[in-house]
Image: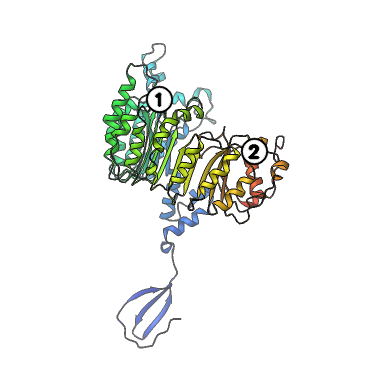
Amino acid sequence: MLTWVRGLTLPHYDRCLDGFTLKQEMTGLTLSRVDPTMQDVPPDIWALIAGYVPSPALPTLMCVNRTLFNLVLDTRYGTVEWGTPDKKLIRLLERLQDPLVASHVRRLHIRPWFIQYLFEREALFQRSSLMERETWSYTFGQMLNYFYPSESNTTPDDRPPRPHGFTTYPSTKELMNSMIKAIKGMTNVVECEFQWRDMPVNADTLSFLSSARASFNSKLSKLILRTRVSRFGQILTFADFPHLTELELHFEYDPSTERGIDEINVDVLIQSVAPFISRLQGTLHTLTIASVARCDHSAFLRALGTLPNLRTLTLQMQFNDAQYLYSPSSLSNLLLRHKAFLTTLVIRPNYDEGLSKALAAWQAISDTCTADLSSLVNLESLTFPTTDLPTMTSLIHNAPAHLHTLRLFGRYLPPEEVSSVISALGSLTKLRTLSLDIQLLNPELFSLLAPTLPALHSLTLVLETSPNLYNTHTFLNEGYVPQTDWQLYDLAIYHKYHKEDSNLNTPSTNMEHDLMWHIASHILPNVKSFKGTGYKRSRWQSVPALGIGAH
């Protein structure tokens, strides 16, 4: 309650107290109500309000105030993908010609595979003498003929409208110019993915890269590049962004039959790529290297300098000690050089002819890496391929006590080895996320895990046997005990053919879902999420039957 004394002498002021304005007057103090306006509502409150509005209805809020106007544009244009030459791309490019709209782009994914096709097609038509030159002057429009039929085949009533930004269907030159203009307005991009592929190196593409370099220079923090190794020397000259904290380099397969292509790739890795990464030592904290390139990567790994701010390292390549990694010590030395900094390590072998062959090639390298496990000393998250039980248990025993994420794949544990591995996991009291490959799923597994890892939050199991083989009657009558005290939140079960590389983004099958539903309903009643999707318990009221023919 506010009280005051009439005639009280106070300095002149005008303040707002809990929605009221307090003013000094000659006769004393008076209290008057001030109604709050929309300008008084903080932006984060408007964001919460917009979160309850269905996505299709969001554009109707653009006229309410500037906060919602910007929020709608952030939602619609926050992530932009250029990858398919269709009507949607044309409309998107038209909108992005406006710098105001382009400034709301935060993540840009460019897959301009169609540029090379359009250039080649346009050159072919220009050389052709079988038809008039103007008939093929707009080659991109021919690709869109499905979406925009020619006027001769439609009536005035059913002809679709042409894009507003172009006088006619854009040619390859017009398309490139519109992309360059859009890029110049994208001054707030923080993440960019670029797939060079077969995009030609000419004045237009160089202008495109220069525009991207100028626009993204101040704020870009994550860069993803995908192309052949031989092209990295060119593209990295436009990628010297000073504030990069995350870098992903994907060395794609080079089908070239040129003699000595392996040596050429090694030279580019050593002369261009390694120095580029080393120059980011002051800012880089996440590095991903994925390669299917035909060359020995040993010299490249040795050429990488020490990155004192590196916290996350992901390596996915052909770990074949003869062709792709002649010297396994180059990998182990890289890990040892960064053992004081790394908190997350992910190693995944690429495979062309099955994971088993890739893991067989990995074994020699694994022996070298696990010979000195001091590189694990500061890790909080570890994803590592293992091919035998001793290596797996050795990794667990040498893992730091503060490890919170462990994903071991490559060996499907038989029932007699499961208990040994779970027993070893008991020393990791901080473990929150666990992923294991097992041969057979039975309720006893959860009876072992619950008391050993009471703080576990997420569990992923990859099965060697098909979920179709599990029958409701036999599965639930194997002496299962409901783990009512275990607070496991997320459960994920995959069949190996759907998740052979332990990739967390693999889609689910119906039988996998049915099996998880039965486990959550009868054995793990506290589970609230499947595969990180957060299913609601209300969806489990009707549990389907397990087994072949249940659907």
Say which of 152 and 127 sits in front: 127
Above-or-below relation of 371 to 252: below
Measuring from the top left, give residue 426's x and y in whole percent. 52, 50
Q: Are marks 1 and 2 in contact (CB under 8 Å)?
A: no
Q: Is residue 83 shown left or right of residue 310? A: right
Residue 253 is labelled as 1
Nearer to the camera, 237 or 432: 432
Q: How crowded is mark 2: few (under 14 residues within 10 Å), some or many (20 or more)?
A: many
Residue found at x 62% / y 38%: 440
**Residue type, label 2:** Met
Per the rendering, the mark at residue 511 is 2
Q: Which amino acid does label 1 sit on?
A: Tyr
Q: Is residue 324 above or below residue 247?
A: above
Residue 533 visible in the snapshot: yes
Residue 10: x and y in percent read 31, 83
Locate residue 530, reporting x and y percent: 58, 46
The CA distance from mark 1 to mark 2 is 35 Å
Give the secondary structure at mark 1.
loop
How is colour applied across the structure in the image? rainbow
Image quadrant in which the C terminus is located: top right
Q: In this view, does 45 lie to the left or right of 459?
A: left
Does label 1 or label 2 sit earlier along the sequence? 1
As helix, strand or loop, the secondary structure at mark 2 comes to helix
- The percent coordinates of residue 455 (x first, y second) are 53, 54
In the image, 154 versus 385, the foreground residue is 385
